[in-house]
Image (tube, rainbow, N blue to C red):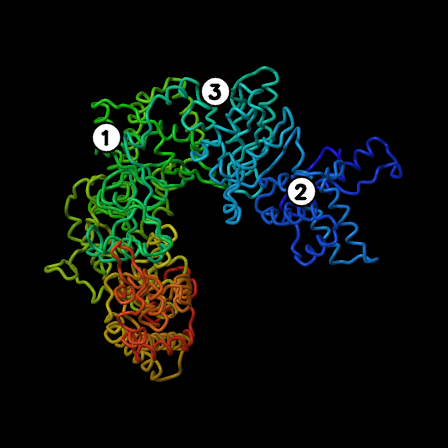
Amino acid sequence: MLAHNLHGVDIDPRCAQIAQLALWMRAQRAFRDFSLARVDRPQIRRSNIVIAEPLVADEQLTKEFVARLGDAELGQVFTALVAKLNLAGDLGLLLPVETFVRQTPESGKTGSLFVTPEERIRAALLRFVSEEGRTSTRRRLFADDAEQGVGLLSVAEKSFDVVLMNPPFGEPTKAGKKARNAHLATCDDDLGAAFMHASATRWARGGLTGVVSSSTLWFKHTLARWREQVLVGDGSAIALGAHLGGQVLDNAKVSAAAMVLAPAATVSNAVFFRCLRDNDKAAALCASIQERRRGIDRPPAFSVTIAELRAYRKSPLVYWISSSLRSDLTRYPALEGTGAEVRQGVACADDPRFVRAWWELPVERVGAGTDWLPFAKSSEYSPFWDDITWIIRWERDGREVRAYEKAYPKNTQYFGRPGVTFPARSYLGFNARAFPASCGFGHMGSVAFPLSGDAALLLGYLASRPLEYVLSFSNGGLQGDLRAFPNHYEVGQVGDVPWPDFGPEVARAIGALAQSAASAAMLLLRNDETTHQHRPSQALRSAKTLDDFIATELAEDERLVEAARSARASLDEMVSTSLGFKREDVDAMEKEFAECNAPTDGPWCPERPSLNNDLRKETARSLTSFAVGVAIGRFDVRRFAENVPRPSPLDTFDVVPTTLLKSPKPKDYPIDLPSMAMFVVDRTDPDLADRLLGDGLAQIWPNAAPDAVSQLCDALHVDHLSSYLSDPGVSGFYTDHARRYSKGRRRAPLYSWFGTASGSFGVLLMAPVATSDTLFILRNEILAPRLTRAERAAEAVRSEIGERSAVTRAALAATEALVTELREFAAELDRVIPLWVPNVDDGVVVNTAAFFRLIPHRDSRTKAEATWKELCGGDLDWSQLAMRFWPERVVPKCANDRSLAIAHGLEDVFWAEGTDGKHTARKTPTKSVDELVKERTSPAVKSALKSLLDAPVFAGRSVGRKAGPRKPASAAAEGDT
């Protein structure tokens, strides 16, 4: 058996060795079972397990071996084999190895009729290794390598009764792609599909292939032609399939499937076992197989004809639906070209450079016709509506993005049109949401644009559960696996769903329901200050206590969720009827949805939050954040006495949230606003923050009893809000703020916190309105007077007459520590003020990077320092800050990178546009590099930069402070730090 019947190939030497050892051990066990004595057991000198790898790497020995063969014909065979097997490690048996040594004898010669080329090469290798009279290690290694290639040839020349494989999946290597392999050409360059295609070419008569691989092969729309050839084709077809789902193939994060292929002539029906949701997949599969053997035909086993599978749209193996539904759905035209145009958007390839959160820019810089455009991309599960969090740099129609060589700006002609957007990947299932007018979109947030102009009808259709169910036929299931893989929703998949002919009344009803559900979903974001849907809260205005407010908002959330679900239920009924669902199809769909995972948090979580201390604390954090925004001039308290119109999901997107304060210093404003949008946090003067926040809270929560500040302090378990605001640890305000203003992978806090290392004194600075004067004002108008007061307080304690008590000594130590911290803060400000010229286009992360020593919050300081290292290393040379600090490095790059030249206003200097609209580098720039560098170099900046790079870090360190027991106000006033 080992010598003649079992053969194997792997690209991993370790796997090959393990397989060889396993076969040897099984043979020994068989000998033992047959009571065969050791002396009588045949020796197993080698197995037919070979490694697919390049034949040899020693060119000199290759030439020497060929020269000593004494057989020109065989030398040509070996040389050709060496050359052809260069890609063996990339493609394995996808290479037609057996064709490399086929030869036609010259006229008049018969060749070696009874000795195959591989046998002759093996014999020559043995002679070559030992011909010097002793074994040469170099020659032995050469012979071992060559032996693997010859063994691969030997396997490739055979035909097999059964082929078993667990092939690689996904794309091949770059070298493998360039090889233009015939098997890869059939299957969109998917390795798993290519190996299955190749396996049928190696069958003996009546052969079979057993495969464990990704179930993507069964469903992916780009593999339709391959499925029609291999899985439901005329030559081969699937006979058995086990749909296993995630957590099957070790650590591979894919949905797995096992299958058996057979000659198509022998297969009329295929049997499938659906074990996606079973925890013990092996037990479920075995139990279902046993039932089939007993003649019991029921799920999770399904039998379907190959003809039915072949007939369905693009031939996904939709084995679990009824024959009537499979047939009915093929009658409708595809959505693409009939009901909508489904398009993928811009892949800018460098989000930190080109994409920001909307709050990082002043609102007047965002919107159609400005430098930044609202931009939809992938986001969390949020059916019907999700806020447009992102903006993309789109000055002059995205000129800089288009010039970036790695970017792929597709379908920008669709920017501005309303439609329906959806994330390209989701664990919890397809969730379509409204895409308003006046926005752009990315490659991970594709959009379907209605051909009829009725975006509401399209939203209702794509957001319905019957459509999601039909779309799941191209993924194999409604959801991915949270521990393994997401579902993918490509534009081709969505574009291929059926588009029924909705009657006018049905279309209007579906559109109205979609608008209603989307409006409800928008209102669910009303208390989230990071969204454009943030609205004045009438519930807060009328509430007396925090519990009153929470209870009212929980009830409103419940009402809105129920309204959206009710609208969706009506949508589901209309859409399922329009698609021809029968009762059995609706029941099967509902069963599938019932087995799905629900969101674990957020408004769509089925477990509604209850009024408890955790919710009180989270609400208090939210209201404190909002109060800081009011006090600093972010939000307009006057809007909270108004009734705001209900939002519309598909109209022009309003880039200015209702609650935003549009004028920095409005007349007759009810509260005083701080200079330069800086909010002072002073732990030793706790009444300051309480008073500033209390003034704002009195406007938005006028009926609070007792006062609003006291209620928030109770919920946060602090004595004063300043204790919460100045806490640099995980329980403090800034940790919550950084989390609140982090979306996706981008961390973009609205406020920059600069202060002493412990957080005892500092300011929250609203980043989008910061100017070059901001730190100067902080140093001279805020910090200097505070430092003077602290120094006087310390001197007063020192000059007290009489023996110092323990209390006095502790007060002196605390006061002197504060003075030291304030002096360090002042010294650091003096060092960096010459460097501070913030540019909002760079983003808050880059703008604060050089000033990481000023940040008390440990995690934020660490991230700022990491960004600073990227700046110093030249990774962020697109930023204005990089040009300001290192023009000698950035300017020359602009000569070779047009996108950088555009970013720094040097495009016309280094680049010229031809008559064909293409740009080429100027042979002679309009201004020399040296001249440009000189213009942009400031001795003062260079001196300050050197001082910054050489400076030590603060002596103090921020540490996590847990809010301890309440202390009397007098203790805090005495300098409790």
Which class describes the residues within 10 Å of circle 3: few (<14), some (14-19), or many (20+)? few
| Element on which disc 2 rests | helix
Label 2, label 3: how far apart the Cα atoms are: 37 Å
Mark positioned earlier in the residue sequence (1 or 2): 2
Instruction: Give left or right: position of 218 versus 966.
Output: right
| Amino acid type, callout 2 | Leu
Which class describes the residues within 10 Å of circle 2: few (<14), some (14-19), or many (20+)? many
- Answer whether residue 688 is visible to the viewer in this image: no
The residue tagged 1 is 511
Instruction: Give left or right: position of 169 versus 975.
Output: right
- How far across and how far down the image is residue 700, in percent? 20, 51
- How far across and how far down the image is residue 424, in percent? 38, 41
The residue tagged 2 is 152
Please, is residue 455 above or below residue 807 in the view? above
| Element on which disc 3 rests | helix
Please, is residue 464 above or below residue 154 in the view? above
- Answer whether residue 426 is visible to the viewer in this image: yes
Instruction: Give left or right: position of 560 versus 238.
Output: left
| Disc 3 versus disc 1: nearer the observer | 3
